[in-house]
Each structure stands twice: as structure tokens, then as C-alpha cells.
């Protein structure tokens, strides 16, 4: 055993003998970490998650989750992990409490502790007052917190979150992640998350992997990935246009490039904070008055664009492959107990 909570080695998935959705994907996730898995639609993200959760057999490669070989023992993996899908899986015709009771039975939670566990989760997710209401009356945020409670009712050591906050408002997203961070802190839970919100990945994740066309194109912490772009961006705006300003800025040591956009000068440099005083001084000595100076570190949006050649779009629809895999995930992961 490697000691990793999740380990993938050379994963390959080929559909119909031709289309390679995933090509030689390898990575590891340390215990207790939050690992973000990002990629454009159709890049192989959903297929990889389906393989790691025991819901899709690989064409080649190996994977372990919490020390269990996923492909030799998929049913054991399904019992050990927690899983929250993008699609709502709570039964609308059951109450919140009944959804949790059903999940407890499916996952083999001891009957003597089921009631206490459910009450604790309802309170923790702040839905105790609505426990005996039908889930169809819940708000989007309440449903997501209920589904998180369902996903962790059996105290899994590894939790998979497949775009869990898609469609929630900022307050709902923040509340959801607050609970996840508490779980990680208190129980050392490992979290594997896909998300369409790059600000979430930047704030929440310890490490990130980006997949494109079935290949991993980048891995590292959010800071490491942004540092690989090699430059901060300093935007300098003069009070009035100056024909010499571009030359003045380019002459400052440490400047990598200068681009003019809408009357402002976008200066790239390895260390933007250290460069700002030099830029201001150079302009002052040249008689150029400045209206504003701002600093921006590379964002994950720019990282995504750099490594995939395209912008990250939150409103992209699922591909046919993504949709088929997700339907299979829902059917197989909870097929043992009928309605969930």
C-alpha cells in the first residue's frame, strides 16, 4: 500500500474500441486533502470519476481508494466512499429524515446508532427544523446539505463530490463548503471534487489536476499552477495619454512585456509587488502623472486558458458521454436499495 487515500495509475478508458475518453491518467491524493479535478466538458473528467468510484470498468490501468483495489472490489469501494452527485438524488416524496434512514439502511449503519447519527447530521447541516418535511419543499441549499449528510452517514474516509454546488447561489455555495471543511478538519476526511467554479477550486483545494482531451495537462497546488504562468500583471493608467509611456515602462528592469489596452498599460513581471515602486518612480521621473496602479496575480481562469487553450465556461452543457456516465453512476451506486 502506498499510503495514499486515492491513487490512479495509467487509467485508460476507450469507448467502442475507438474513442479514448481517458488516456494514461495517473495521480495520487494524500489522506485528509481536498483534491480538485478540473476540465472542460468532454475532457474525461466524468469518466475518470466514474472509474474511481467503481461505477465504470477501465480499459486499462489501476486505481485504489482507501486502500481498496477499485476494479477488483468495486462493491466494497462503493460501501466505503461517500458520493454526492451534481444531480439531486434525494427522494422528493420522502422527508429529510426518511432519506437519511434509507441511506443508513443501504450503507449498513448499525440500527442502535442510526437515530442518534441522523439527529446529529440534521442539526449539523442546519436542517433539523425541516427534518420531517417532504424534501420537495426544501430550497436548493437545503437539498444539497441533505445530500451531503446522506453521503457521509456511514462515516466514509473518502468523499467524492461531483459538481456539488452547481446552481446554488453564493451564500448556498459558501455554506456547503463550510460543512465540508469542518468534516475534513474534524475527521481527516479526504475529498475529491469536480467543480465548475474556479474560485471554489482556488479557495478550497489543496491540490488541483487539470484534464483535457483525456490527458492530465497540469497538477499542483493552486499557487504552484499560477506560479507556472511566470508573471504577475500590473495595470498602470496615466492621467492623460503619453506617447513615451510604453517605452518608459519597458525600460524598467524586471518587466517582461507591456501591452496597451483601453488607455491602460498591462505590465507582466515575475514579482509585481516589487516592481510597482519602480514603475511609479520611472513615470514620475518622466513627468507622467498616474491615475491608478493595480496588481493582479494570475488566476485559475488564466491557468485553465494556458493549459487547455480555452476559457472555462460555467454554463457548458454535458456531453453525451458525460450524461451516460452520470446516469450509470446514479443507477449503480444506489441500485441495491431501489428508491433513494
Image (cartoon, helix red, strand yellow):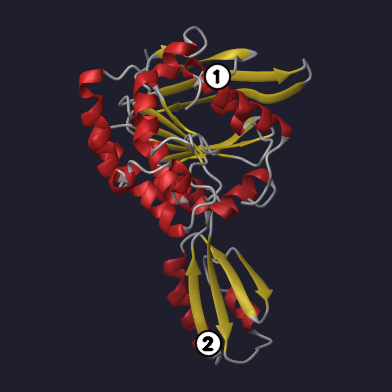
Instruction: Give the Cα separation between the discs numbered 1 and 2.
Output: 62 Å
Q: Residues within 10 Å of mark 2 (few under 14, many from 20)?
A: some
Chain-order first, disc 1 or disc 2 = 2
In percent of width and height, residue 91 lies at 48, 34
Residue 289 in picture, x, y percent from top left: 53, 91
Residue at label 1? 332
Can residue 25 be seen by looking at this rendering? no
The quarter of the rendered structure image containing the N terminus is top left
Q: Position of residue 92 (x, y in %)?
A: 49, 38
In the depicted view, which residue is nearer to us: 146 or 265?
146
Residue 308, x across and y down, in percent: 66, 44
Q: Give above or below for 264 relative to 31.
A: below
Q: Quadrant of residue 123?
A: top left
Q: How many marks?
A: 2
For the point 39% across and 26% down, the residue is 103
Relative placement, left or right, of 132 versus 143 is left
Q: Quadrant of residue 32?
A: top left
Q: Which mark is residue 290?
A: 2
Amino acid at each position: 500500500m502506498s499510503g495514499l487515500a486515492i491513487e490512479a495509475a495509467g487509467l485508460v478508458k476507450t469507448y467502442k474500441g475507438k474513442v479514448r475518453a481517458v488516456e494514461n491518467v495517473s495521480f495520487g491524493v494524500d489522506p485528509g486533502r481536498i483534491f480538485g479535478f478540473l476540465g472542460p466538458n468532454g475532457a474525461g473528467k466524468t469518466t475518470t470519476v466514474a472509474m474511481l468510484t467503481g461505477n465504470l470498468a477501465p480499459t486499462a490501468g489501476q486505481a485504489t481508494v482507501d486502500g481498496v483495489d477499485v476494479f477488483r472490489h468495486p462493491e466494497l469501494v462503493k460501501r466505503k466512499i461517500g458520493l454526492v452527485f451534481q444531480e439531486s438524488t434525494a427522494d422528493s416524496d420522502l422527508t429529510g429524515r426518511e432519506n437519511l434512514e434509507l441511506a443508513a439502511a443501504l450503507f449498513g449503519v448499525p440500527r442502535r446508532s442510526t437515530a442518534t447519527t441522523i439527529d446529529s447530521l440534521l442539526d449539523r447541516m442546519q436542517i433539523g427544523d425541516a427534518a420531517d418535511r417532504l424534501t420537495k419543499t426544501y430550497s436548493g441549499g437545503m437539498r444539497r446539505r441533505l445530500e451531503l449528510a446522506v453521503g457521509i452517514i456511514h462515516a466514509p474516509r473518502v468523499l467524492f463530490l461531483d459538481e456539488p454546488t452547481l446552481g446554488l447561489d453564493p451564500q448556498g455555495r459558501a455554506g456547503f463548503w463550510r460543512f465540508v471543511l469542518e468534516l475534513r478538519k474534524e475527521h481527516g476526511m479526504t475529498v475529491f471534487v469536480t467543480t465548475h467554479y474556479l474560485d471554489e477550486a482556488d479557495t478550497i483545494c489543496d491540490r488541483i489536476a487539470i484534464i483535457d482531451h483525456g490527458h492530465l495537462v497540469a497538477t499542483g497546488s493552486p499557487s504552484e499552477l499560477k506560479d507556472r504562468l511566470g508573471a504577475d500583471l500590473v495595470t498602470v493608467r496615466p492621467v492623460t495619454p503619453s506617447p513615451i509611456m510604453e517605452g518608459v515602462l519597458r525600460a524598467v528592469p524586471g518587466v517582461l512585456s507591456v501591452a496597451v489596452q483601453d488607455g491602460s498599460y498591462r505590465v507582466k513581471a515575475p514579482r509585481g509587488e516589487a516592481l510597482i515602486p519602480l514603475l511609479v518612480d520611472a513615470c514620475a521621473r518622466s513627468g507622467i502623472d498616474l491615475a491608478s496602479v493595480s496588481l493582479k496575480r494570475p488566476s485559475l481562469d488564466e491557468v485553465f486558458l494556458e493549459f487547455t487553450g480555452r476559457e472555462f465556461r460555467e454554463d457548458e452543457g454535458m456531453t453525451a458521454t458525460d450524461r451516460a456516465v452520470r446516469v450509470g453512476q446514479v443507477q449503480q451506486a444506489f441500485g441495491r436499495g431501489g428508491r433513494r
